[in-house]
């Protein structure tokens, strides 16, 4: 199977690189949005990194997705892992008041003027900071959020904003 051979070669190359590099200095690998990883990527992380010495792995994943720590542990060989601890830190999304402050600063408007928009963004994104930015950009792209030059301020169509679809990965 050519795919299996390629996967083996990649794992072997990454393992060899990590082993050589980690012999000289500690290594830190940071993987963001690991909840989007396919099984091949999880295998690569588990087989090539989790069994190496002098390696710290930091993964971020959505809480509402399968737990990546369990996924990696199920793919790795627990007896060979050199990890001494796996720690999970749960990060909460931004609160409505934090989103209100953020949107107020970004749009240059008083907080009371953006409260409804902030509430909508909190509902659509769960307070995910990246999701808030993406949702605001999408609203600008589709004309829901626009700068009114006559009023010299940002405005938005509340009805369009409420009906807009939640962007994938943002809720």
Image (cartoon, grey):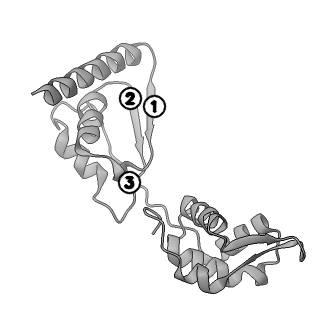
Vertical placement of residue 68 versus 62, above or below: above
Residue at image point 32% right, 61% down: 65
Q: Position of residue 52 (x, y in %)?
A: 30, 25
Furthest residue toward left: 1
- CA distance separating discs 1 and 2: 6 Å
Q: For the C terminus, give its image quadrant.
A: bottom left
Vertical placement of residue 60 versus 93, above or below: above
**Element assignment for label 2:** strand
**Considering only order in the chain, which callout, 2 or 1, is on the residue closer to the N terminus?**
1
Residue that numbered label 1 is attached to: 28
- CA distance separating discs 1 and 3: 17 Å
Mark 3 Cα shell of 10 Å, populated few (<14), some (14-19), many (≥20): few
Residue at image point 30% right, 38% down: 84
**Element assignment for label 3:** loop
**Considering only order in the chain, which callout, 3 or 1, is on the residue closer to the N terminus?**
1
- CA distance separating discs 3 and 2: 17 Å
Mark 2 Cα shell of 10 Å, populated few (<14), some (14-19), many (≥20): many
**Considering only order in the chain, which callout, 2 or 3, is on the residue closer to the N terminus?**
2
Vertical placement of residue 77 versus 170, above or below: above
Residue at image point 25% right, 36% down: 46
Contact check, label 1 and label 2, Cβ < 8 Å: yes
Q: Is residue 88 left or right of residue 10?
A: right
Residue that numbered label 3 is attached to: 88
Given residues 77 and 135, the one toward you in this image is 135
Res 55 label? 2
Given residues 147 and 108, the one toward you in this image is 147
Given residues 110 and 139, the one toward you in this image is 139
**Element assignment for label 1:** strand
Given residues 168 and 171, the one toward you in this image is 168
Q: Position of residue 3 (x, y in %)?
A: 17, 30
Residue at image point 31% right, 22% down: 14
Q: Position of residue 153 (x, y in %)?
A: 85, 73
């Amino acid at each position: 199977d050519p795919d299996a051979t390629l996967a083996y070669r990649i794992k072997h190359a990454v393992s060899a690189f990590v082993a050589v590099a980690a012999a000289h200095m500690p290594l830190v690998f940071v993987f963001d949005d690991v909840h989007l990883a396919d099984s091949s990527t999880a295998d690569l992380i588990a087989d090539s990194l989790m069994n190496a010495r002098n390696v710290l792995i930091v993964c971020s994943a959505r809480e509402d997705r399968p737990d990546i720590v369990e996924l990696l542990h199920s793919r790795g060989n627990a007896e060979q892992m050199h990890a001494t601890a796996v720690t999970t830190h749960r990060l909460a999304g931004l609160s409505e008041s934090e989103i209100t402050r953020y949107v107020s600063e970004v749009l240059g408007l008083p907080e009371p003027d953006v409260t409804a928009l902030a509430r909508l963004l909190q509902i659509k994104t769960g307070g995910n900071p990246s999701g808030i930015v993406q949702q605001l950009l999408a609203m600008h792209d589709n004309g829901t959020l626009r700068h009114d030059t006559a009023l010299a301020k940002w405005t938005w169509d509340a009805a369009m904003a409420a009906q807009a679809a939640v962007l994938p990965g943002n809720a």
